[in-house]
Amino acid sequence: MASIADWPLPRDIPLPLPADSILLQTLLVVLFLWHILFVNLMVGGSLLTVVFQLIGRQRPDFTVLARAIAGTVTVNKSLAVVLGVGPLLAINVLYTVYFYTANALTGGAWLAIVPLVTLAFLLTYAHKYTWDRLANARGLHIALGMAGAGLFLVIPLIFLTNINLMLFPGRWLQVEGFLSALLLPNVWPRYFHFLTASVAITGLFLLFFFLRSGCPVETKLRDLDRAGLRRLFYGISLGATALQLLFGPWVLFTLPGHGMSWYLIGVISTGVVFALWAMHLMWREITVPLARAMPRAALIFVLITLTAFAMGYGRHVYRESALQEHRALMAAHTQDAGWLASAAAWREATGQQVLRIPMGQRVFESTCAACHAQDRVLVGPSLVEIAGIYRDDPGGIAAWTRQPGRKRTEMPPMPAFRLDNETLQAVAGYMLERVAGPAPTEGG
């Protein structure tokens, strides 16, 4: 990927935030976690419904479980949609240009979300309410469930690809639609991590759902009892959580390195510790006979909740860090464009004609002239000396400015300038032209 200075720099929207930035970021993380919880339950529930219905052809108890789970999916999908409004608004406000650029680049797939969601809901309701009517056409009924579950797999993939694309401004000029965005390195690891999280959380939810007081397990099931259900759903959650620990490092290794920090590693590691603790307790619940087992479900739920919070917060920490420098460059570019627009409006209103100062000269005089004079040493070498080294090579000056080293111990090291490549090339060209032409007077 190109360096940050070479990423495209769209103009930001120069409007103030409607609330404090920290408050908006907090709302984004909290509202997103609420939303993703019910998305997880929707996706995990639809998958387990189909799987249990298939198993139910040989083991009737699983058909009973599948029918009950199908009833929860329609509720969870409604909550997922309603609770999705909050984080969507927050991310629109905090990352406006990034979010809408990703929307535009994913094109038709992004526009297809609403009709796909509508179709998925219709299929899910059709599957839920035709259970008895299609009792003699189980293949068709299972096909309805599979179609709905398939759409529930596709829709989060579109969202995830879109959100992921926000983190890769350096790839915006290479992305050509949704299928192209799917090839970005972090998409599939994050998607598999999401799927396993959905199954893990749904397993715990179904544990509470079927083992709650008053649930008629004994009258509805023939072969499975409460102990068997306990082992079944803990086993599903434990297996899916273990897979998450495999996909997690893949997610980290495919993220651009400029967004990494020890703080982020600490947040993610804390989440992993909580997950390992929960896995240990789930294993104990599975292996210890019911008569000797301690009720650990509440603690396991708390640990998984803390794991989810750590991972969600970690994603936000990475996003802020990865985009920080590019956002600063974009803000400077936007401010520069604002000044040019204001100057043009003033000239038009007053009829004044002013000399337009080339960008290279303007940036040099405001930034570089404090250290580099025409033919004498200030803090750094003179322009004459620089031109002697980089004659006919403005790109060499630009590269050194972006990542300077230290050649002379008697001079202080030069700081790196995170300007875009076009600006650096313009400054370098001006420096060489200034030496080649008549030497200006001091201050000129």
Image: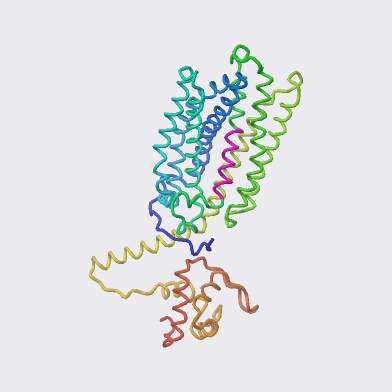
Q: Name the dominant secondary structure of the magenta segment.
A: helix
Q: Is residue 382 left or right of residue 426?
A: right
Residue 17 sits above or below residue 333 on the image: above
Q: Position of residue 369 (x, y in %)?
A: 48, 76
Nearer the observer, 131 or 394: 131
Q: Which residue is most to the bottom?
A: 438
Q: How many marks?
A: 0
Q: Residue at x 59, y 22 (%)?
A: 57
Nearer the observer, 246 or 414: 246
Q: Is residue 122 left or right of residue 215?
A: left
Q: Position of residue 327 (x, y in %)?
A: 47, 56
Residue 5 sits above or below residue 306 on the image: below
If the image is split into quadrants, where does the C terminus sit? bottom left
Q: Position of residue 63 (x, y in %)?
A: 57, 21
If the image is split into quadrants, where does the N terminus sit? bottom right
Residue 268 magenta: no
Q: Residue at x 60, y 18 (%)?
A: 60
Q: Residue at x 45, y 18 (%)?
A: 133
Residue 318 sits above or below residue 434 on the image: above
Residue 76 sits above or below residue 179 on the image: above
Q: Position of residue 382 (x, y in %)?
A: 53, 82
Q: Image quadrant of residue 81? A: top left
Nearer the observer, 286 or 370: 286
Q: Image quadrant of residue 130? A: top left
- Applied colour scheme: rainbow
Which range is magenta?
186-200
Residue 194 magenta: yes
Q: Which residue is most to the top?
A: 219
Q: Is residue 395 left or right of residue 107?
A: right
